[in-house]
Image: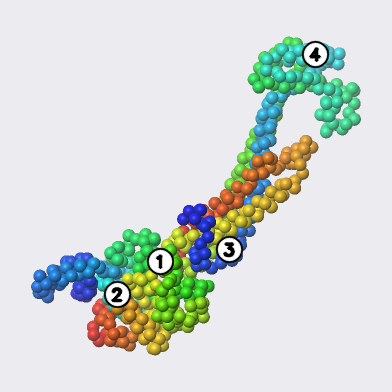
């Protein structure tokens, strides 16, 4: 009994088993519901993956120098730091953030009308690495010599747990997909067992006239596989519509609005009905062959 | 002794030794015996169903004990015995629905314990079974039920003789009827048609006339006798002695009787 053969119509084999009614409908509904959830788990997993990649790649190439010095030395030390950075191998670019940019950074916490001039804020210098990267320890020593108030922050301290969290989130997404598949398999197994038990008399007659287990199982497996496939197709479409209706990703929305598919990623959920069909095939086949041995 | 007699009834005995013993006991001419064995082998057939020291236990105790017999190809046997004596169990052993708890059963020269589930299915295609409570697929019309053995064997195209077959069992006008709408006699004849459509070597019938009036019983018996004359091996479990007497008038039927868990060949007085 092979999967492609299962999908081939066989009116004779289909007819010998009466319609399974509630059990088959339950399979379709289960597949639809589980696949609907699977679409979101898949979106979560893919979005987490994108986030982890972005944090680990783009943030890894940037760092910040923070200069805390008396007001009369701030400009002098800033110039010294920029000079050191310009001469450091591995640094592609460096620039001091303007007052407006620093105000924008603080605005979420202190509002837009923060009196920057009245506050002893440090000067921030954004550093962009090239592909080779710089020697962090050497740069720290040079900065300490040229600008005692300068502190190099290469984001490692907070970037690592964020990337780790994103990777864990991605793992949880895949784990959820696996669990959804297992639950779907279990539900379809229960439904198939119910259908087989309800048709015990039919199975007995078929065995009596010389039907092989594979012939009897095929009628059930085909029915449940197709039900699961079409149910999963409906669930996938519904889930994709739900994802498509979510707000667009922007800077203000952050992670949640980025929960979706991008580009070719929209094709990935289309695999879910096929996977659901495979799960149903395996679950029903196993249930049918086991139950047949019990019944006859 | 009964085993030996039944061995001789077969057209070819796979184990020759009992024949030699039989010949010595009855002082048969060895040349004559050799010729007989040669003739038997030349016919190219073996015992279709053979029991060797078979026992069967239900949870409650032993139902059949030390049963040894062979059903020869083309033979006609009745199996009698009181209710609960094990007639149905014996038939189920004959088509491998049950396995013996002791001893050896051979179907078409293959030991049933060595048969896989697929092998059992293929073997059953050579054995037509008619139950007292004929079981059908109630959601399918009579024609589909009768051709079910062909369908499951992947030979659903071979139904050209279906009309003749239904006519033969007198159900030509009920081809599209659903099984629940058939009478007891019609169901029995439909079951017989289903049992023979694959051209089986053996037909087993379990109380086939149990629910029928005498006229219908005779009609069914006539069909079974006709099948026997076509070379089919027939075994009918029944307690209807009148039916047996009627059959013995038409065909060389032998009667097996279950007594005290054993099967014996019944005498002329049944």
Neighbor class of circle 3 (other Cα within 10 Å; few <14, some 14-19, many 20+) is many
Q: Mark 4 lies on which chain?
A: A
Of label 4 and label 3, which has the lower sequence position?
A: 3
Neighbor class of circle 2 (other Cα within 10 Å; few <14, some 14-19, many 20+) is some
Q: Do the residues labelled 2 and 4 touch (CB within 8 Å)?
A: no
Q: Mark 3 lies on which chain?
A: A
- Left or right of B163? Residue A239 is right
Nearest-to-viewer mark from 2 and 4: 2
Instruction: State the image coordinates of residue B223 (x, y, percent, origin top left).
Output: 36, 81
Disc 4 is placed on an element classified as helix
Which label is found at residue A23? Answer: 3
| Image quarter of the C terminus of chain A | bottom left
| Label 3, label 2: how far apart the Cα atoms are | 46 Å
Tell which of A278 and B96 is nearer to you.
A278
Residue A65 visible to an observer of this rendering: no
Q: Name the residue under label 4.
A: A79
Tell which of B138 and A115 is nearer to you.
B138
Q: Which chain carries label 1?
A: A
Of label 3 and label 1, which has the lower sequence position?
A: 3
Which label is found at residue B231? Answer: 2
């Amino acid at each position: 009994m092979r999967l492609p053969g299962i999908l081939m119509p066989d009116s004779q084999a289909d007819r010998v088993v009466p319609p399974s009614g509630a059990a088959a409908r339950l399979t379709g509904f289960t597949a639809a519901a589980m696949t609907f959830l699977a679409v979101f788990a898949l979106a979560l997993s893919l979005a987490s993956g994108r986030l982890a990649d972005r944090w680990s790649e783009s943030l890894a190439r940037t760092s910040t120098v923070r200069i805390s010095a008396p007001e009369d030395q701030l400009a002098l030390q800033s110039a010294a730091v920029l000079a050191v950075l310009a001469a450091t191998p591995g640094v592609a670019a460096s620039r001091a953030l303007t007052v407006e940019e620093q105000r924008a950074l603080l605005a979420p916490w202190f509002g837009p009308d923060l009196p920057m001039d009245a506050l002893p804020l440090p000067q921030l210098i954004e550093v962009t690495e090239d592909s080779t990267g710089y020697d962090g320890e050497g740069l720290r020593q040079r900065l300490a010599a040229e600008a005692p108030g300068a502190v190099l922050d290469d984001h490692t301290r907070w970037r690592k747990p964020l990337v780790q969290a994103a990777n864990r989130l991605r793992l949880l997404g895949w784990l959820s997909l696996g669990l959804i598949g297992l639950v779907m398999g279990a539900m379809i197994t229960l439904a198939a067992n119910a259908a087989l038990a309800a048709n015990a008399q039919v199975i007995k007659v078929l065995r009596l006239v010389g039907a092989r287990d594979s012939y009897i199982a095929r009628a059930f497996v085909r029915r449940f596989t197709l039900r699961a496939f079409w149910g999963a197709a409906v669930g996938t479409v519904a889930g994709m519509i739900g994802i498509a209706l979510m707000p667009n990703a922007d800077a203000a929305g952050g992670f949640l609005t980025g929960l979706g598919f991008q580009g070719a990623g929209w094709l990935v959920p289309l695999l879910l009905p096929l996977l659901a069909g495979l799960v149903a095939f395996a679950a029903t086949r196993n249930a049918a062959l086991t139950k047949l041995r019990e019944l006859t | 002794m009964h085993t030996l007699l039944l061995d001789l009834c077969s057209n070819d005995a796979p184990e020759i030794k009992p024949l030699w013993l039989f010949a010595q006991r009855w002082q048969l001419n060895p040349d004559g015996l050799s010729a007989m064995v040669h003739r038997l082998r030349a016919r190219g057939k073996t015992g279709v169903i053979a029991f060797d020291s078979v026992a069967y236990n239900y949870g409650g105790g032993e139902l059949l004990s030390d049963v040894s017999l062979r059903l020869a190809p083309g033979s006609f046997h009745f199996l009698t015995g009181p209710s609960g004596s094990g007639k149905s169990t014996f038939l189920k052993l004959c088509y491998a629905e049950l396995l013996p708890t002791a001893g050896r059963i051979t179907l078409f020269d293959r030991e049933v314990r060595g048969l896989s589930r697929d092998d059992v299915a293929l073997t059953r295609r050579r054995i037509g079974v008619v139950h007292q409570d004929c079981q059908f697929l109630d959601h399918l019309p009579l024609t589909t039920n009768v051709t079910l053995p062909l369908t499951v064997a992947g030979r659903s195209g071979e139904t050209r003789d279906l009309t003749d077959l239904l006519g033969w069992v007198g159900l030509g006008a009920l081809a599209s009827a659903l099984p629940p709408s058939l009478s007891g006699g019609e169901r029995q004849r439909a079951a017989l048609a289903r049992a023979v459509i694959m051209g089986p070597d053996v037909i087993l019938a379990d109380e086939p006339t149990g629910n029928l009036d005498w006229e219908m019983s005779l009609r069914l018996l006539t069909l079974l006798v006709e099948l026997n004359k076509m070379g089919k091996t027939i075994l009918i479990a029944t307690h209807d002695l009148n039916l047996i007497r009627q059959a013995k008038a038409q065909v060389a039927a032998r009667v097996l009787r279950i007594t005290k868990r054993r099967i014996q060949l019944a005498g002329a007085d049944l």
